[in-house]
Image: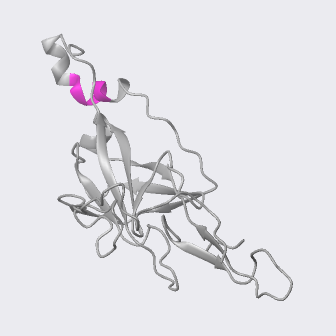
Amino acid sequence: MYVPRGAREGEKIVLSGEADQVPDQEPGDIIFTVKEKPHEIFSRAGQDLSTAITVSLQEALTGINRTVMKHLDGRGLKLDTLTSGKVLRPGEILLVEGEGMPIRKSDSKGDLYIEIKVDFPEDGWLKDPKASQQLQNMLGGHTQIPIIVADSEEDIHYRVVENKEGFGADSDDPRAANAEWEDEDDEDGPQEQQCAQQ
């Protein structure tokens, strides 16, 4: 069975004439309903993706130039703030256009929203007042950010947005930002994968 690129929760895939065949009767259809499995890194609303990355305090303050995640297609996405001098703040959202899910019947893709998390040192790590003069050197030694290995790397171009209000915008996906969730008993809501015969 072929699942189209960009298919999402609740969409139906119809195999015409593939249901049980009975003599002298036209066979019905088999209908599959798409059920998405949760992903360990990305969440989805419409054609947009959302994730979070953790940077060290030193990287947040002085800059970063490394691969921060592996995308669904295996590409490593590299974030470079060294050249711009951008300070990364906890909870800040970076919007990367065109790095979301494919849009059906189109060459376009949705967007990727990246939330910044900063790995702060433990309380009391800086007790010596003289050590504050060497703060720049000390900041790098208190975190262990995992190294991401990917087959290829690609620099990402981003812009800072205030929030994830645009996440899944213009879609009817209930996971979109500011979406109103339907009642669980709603007949039109996402259903488990199933086969139906006519």
Q: Residue at x 76, y 78 (%)?
A: 18
| Quarter of the image with the C terminus in it | bottom right
Left or right: 194 as drawn, with respect to 94: right
| Quarter of the image with the N terminus in it | bottom right
Residue 116 seen from this side:
yes
Q: Residue at x 40, y 68 (%)?
A: 188
Q: Position of residue 148 (x, y in %)?
A: 54, 44
Does 137 lie within the magenta span? yes
Which secondary structure class fits the magenta region best? helix
Residue sitting nearer the eye, 135 or 163:
163
Q: Position of residue 35 (x, y in %)?
A: 54, 59
Q: Position of residue 110 (x, y in %)?
A: 41, 72
Left or right: 32 as drawn, with respect to 182: right
Residue sitting nearer the eye, 15 or 133:
15
Q: How many marks?
A: 0
User: What range is drawn magenta here?
Assistant: 134-139
Q: Quadrant of residue 57?
A: top left
Left or right: 141 as drawn, with respect to 134: right
Does 66 lie within the magenta span? no
Residue placed farthest to the right in the image?
Answer: 23
Q: Residue at x 55, y 58 (%)?
A: 72
Q: Quadrant of residue 5?
A: bottom right
* 113 lies above or below 19: above
Residue sitting nearer the eye, 72 or 87:
72
Residue 85 seen from this side:
no
Q: Position of residue 193 (x, y in %)?
A: 59, 60
